[in-house]
Image (spheres, rainbow, N blue to C red):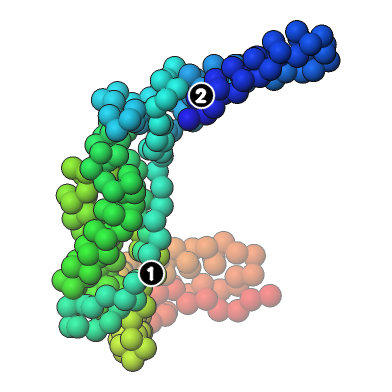
Amino acid sequence: MFFIVGIIAAVVFFLIHLNVKKARRLQEATITLIIAIGSLIFSAAQVFTVIPAGTVGVVDFLGMVSDNTLKPGVNLVNPLARIIKYSFKTQELKETMTVPSKEGLPVQLEISLLYRVDPAMANDIYKTVEAGDYLNVILIPQFRSVVRGVTAKFEAKALYTEAREQLANEITSELQKMVAQRGITVESAPLRQIALPPRLTQSIEEKLQAEQESQRMSFILQKEKQEADRKRIEAKGIADFQSIVSDGINANLLKWKGIEATEKLANSQNSKVVVIGAGKDGLPLILGND
């Protein structure tokens, strides 16, 4: 369209230029010539189009869609063709919806969907989807349907605890099966928030708190048991040591140690009288000192 307008403008102003030139109105002739040249340049520029990075272009010429897409960069195109651009960068879709759980309880989900267009199928999307609006025609309705269907497989209390990751994985897998053939790639469906009915939430939190308290008490009891085992082992070690020592001490050893002690005392400067055999069990008796 702009190409045709530019060509028409260039022709019109060039004809005006010729007329005013004949009339020797040089200033007007110069202005019309400049406008004609500008219009011609504008028209010539329409044969080039720039496709941004992360984008492909679909060429539609009078209802005929080219099998080839335009790659990122500067492309030479038919100036009469219409160029439709599709981004194949990762995009995020955010949804907030209320869906039923397995028990039929209402669960409010805040969920995101990370997706991208398959650049090789951009032509198919344009040809098979109304106005090329794949987001509203295909992705959003299918996404909502899958979320409702998958959530209905889980109990509400499971969604609040360990099943969140499993739910997100199943949504991603099921949705990918439905939209992959339409040229859309689903990367992930992370759950941002899950809100359950208040009474159920309170019940679950109380149960979790009770489980945590039970685990804490089990830990304390286990620790006390380990401490009791340690003390028992320590006491047994002391008893074994005392038994070994007492078994090694007999009367002859005591007499021998007594004689050694007497000898040392006899050699001491403080010793006065040593009576051999006067003590109990025949041990020497020390009498007197300085």
- Residue 61: where, in percent of width, then height? 34, 28
The picture quadrant where one finds residue 199 is: bottom left
Would residue 252 be visible to someone looking at this image?
Answer: no
Q: For this view, does 9 lie left or right of residue 107?
A: right
* Dot 1: element: strand
The picture quadrant where one finds residue 9 is: top right
Question: Which disc, if any, is residue 51?
Answer: none
Front label number (2 vs 1): 2
Instruction: Say which of 128 and 91 sits in front.
Output: 128
Q: For this view, does 126 lie left or right of residue 56?
A: left
Residue drawn 33% across the image and 81% down it: 196
Contact, mark 2 vs mark 1 (Cβ under 8 Å): no
- Residue 128: where, in percent of width, then height? 23, 43
* Dot 2: element: helix
Residue drawn 66% across the image and 19% down it: 13
- Residue 60: where, in percent of width, then height? 34, 30
Q: Quadrant of the C terminus?
A: bottom right
Pointer 2 residue: 3
Q: Residue furthest front?
A: 23
Disc 1 crowd rating (10 Å Cα; few below 14, some 14-19, many 20+) is some
- Kind of residue at badge 1: Thr
* Alpha carbon distance from label 2 to label 1: 45 Å
